[in-house]
Structures are given as C-alpha cells and as structure tokens.
C-alpha cells in the first residue's frame, strides 16, 4: 500500500518556467489537498478537492492551478514560477467526513532561482 | 478568525525526561483536533486525534494529549522522551469545512 505518492522529490526551476507537481493516492480517498511548508509558517493550504471534478481555493492559491480528473490524481501546476514559490510542497488525502485525519506524501522540495 | 497557535518554536529536553508541547486554538465551536509529527525529509504522520468524549486521548509512540475546553488547549505529552522523538510536531484543527489549519510547529531536540 503506497499511500500518497509525490513526484518529483526535488526540483530546481528558473523564474518563469512552468511545472507540474504530481500527487497520487491509492486509498480511494475523496478528499485531497495541497500545502506549502515554509519556515516558521507551518503548513498553508493552497488548493483542495472534495472529489473528482471539484476543486476549491485554500489560503494561498495565487500562482497555482489544480485539476482533479480522477479520484487518484491531484496535480499542482505552477504556470510561471517565481522565487516566492520556493518551498516544500505536501499533498494530503483523507476519506469520509472532514473530521478524518489526513495522510501525507513525503513532499516535493522546490527551488526557484 | 480561526487559528491554531503553538507558542514554542523550539524545545530541548533530555532523554528520559517528560515532555509537554502546547497547542491553543481559536474557533467558534470546538474543532476536531490533531497532532502530527514530521521527521526530517518526511511527510507528516498522525500521532493522535480528538473528536469528542474522553478529554485524554492516547496516540502512537507513547504520546497522549489532553483537551481542555476552558483553556482552548490541546497539549501533547509524553512521560519519557526517547532520542528518536526528535522531530517537528504540528497541531492542527478543522471545524468541518474540509479546511485544516496547522500551527507553525514545535521543533523538539533531545539531548543524550
């Protein structure tokens, strides 16, 4: 049981480049989320999805796009990378109601030069 | 506004000593509460959760947490810390809107 799988684990981009961070879960969870983790700021919600075809913005959505065409996959797209997007990105999923704990991937460490 | 506060950025304890990590929340109603642990280079792992009922909840790795409504707190405790407990700990809450709010984390250092 792989749980939540994120790829790549590390990436370096130049300002203005685009990129997609991949997230896949094999637990048939309806709910999936993307967070960014920055020093001293904890985890901040970027976008989330409550099911295939349904997404919504979180606390810090600017500069990021998401889509959810299948239950398993929830990719995060950076259309034009900026140095302020240098961060560690975590994908999470959970089942059932919103009171369920989330399962996290191991993260993608992204540096924008 | 809803918030989760972890007042301590860093905590250092000696191996074998007891541990308490603080978490305070600000919500209109009692939220669902969680503690997660993050080892270096890893994602977050659930330690324990509180939904309702008994205010003292047991988790994995010998951790427990006590919910105190009057203090809006959900502090994490362990009677005897092991060197492998060195990590970053996050408190989180959700009120049922599918949006979780995380505290800023407490980094635990364990002295041999």
Image: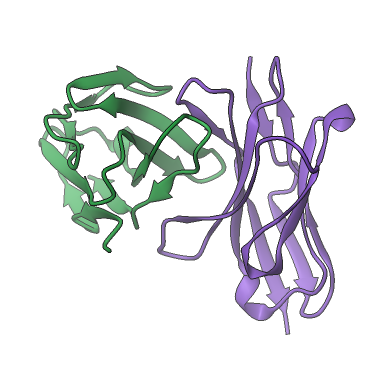
Chain colours: A green, B purple
Place of residue A108 in the rendered image (x, y in percent of width and height, measured from the top left): 28, 52
Quarter holding the N terminus of chain A is bottom left
Task: Tell me which residue sits at (34%, 35%) in the image.
Answer: A33
Q: Quick one: A57 or A41, which is closer to the camera?
A: A57
Please provide percent x and percent y for residue B111.
Answer: 73, 79
The one of A53 and A108 positioned closer to us in this rendering: A53
Report the quarter where the C terminus of chain A lies: top left
Q: Is residue A66 left or right of residue B77?
A: left
In the image, what residue occupies the spot 36% across and 43% down?
A92
The vertical placement of A16 against A112, above or below, is above
Left or right of residue B6: residue A18 = left
**Looking at this view, is A58 or A68 the one in front?**
A68
Residue A2 quadrant: bottom left
User: Which of the pair A81/B60 is nearer the observer?
Assistant: B60
Q: Please state the horizontal and vertical placement of residue B68, each as a whole percent of the image.
A: 84, 36
Quadrant position of residue A46:
top left
């Amino acid at each position: 049981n792989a749980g939540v799988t994120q790829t790549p684990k590390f990436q370096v981009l130049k300002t203005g480049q685009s990129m997609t961070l991949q997230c896949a879960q094999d637990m048939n969870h309806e709910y999936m989320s993307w967070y960014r983790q920055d020093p001293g700021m904890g985890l901040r919600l970027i976008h989330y999805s409550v099911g295939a075809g349904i997404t919504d913005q979180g606390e810090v959505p600017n500069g990021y796009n998401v889509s959810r065409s299948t239950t398993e996959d929830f990719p995060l797209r950076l259309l034009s990378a900026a140095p302020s997007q240098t961060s560690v990105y975590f994908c999470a999923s959970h089942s059932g109601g919103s009171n369920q704990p989330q399962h996290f991937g191991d993260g993608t460490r992204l540096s924008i030069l | 506004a809803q918030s989760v506060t972890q007042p301590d950025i860093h905590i250092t304890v000696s191996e074998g000593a007891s541990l308490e990590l603080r978490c305070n929340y600000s919500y209109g109603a009692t939220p669902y509460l969680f503690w997660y642990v993050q080892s270096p280079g890893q994602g977050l792992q659930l330690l324990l959760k509180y939904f309702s009922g008994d205010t003292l909840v047991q988790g994995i790795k010998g951790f427990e947490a006590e919910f105190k409504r009057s203090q809006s707190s959900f502090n994490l405790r362990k009677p005897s810390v092991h060197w492998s407990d060195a990590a970053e700990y996050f408190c989180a809450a959700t009120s049922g809107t599918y949006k979780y709010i995380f505290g800023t984390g407490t980094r635990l250092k364990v002295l041999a």
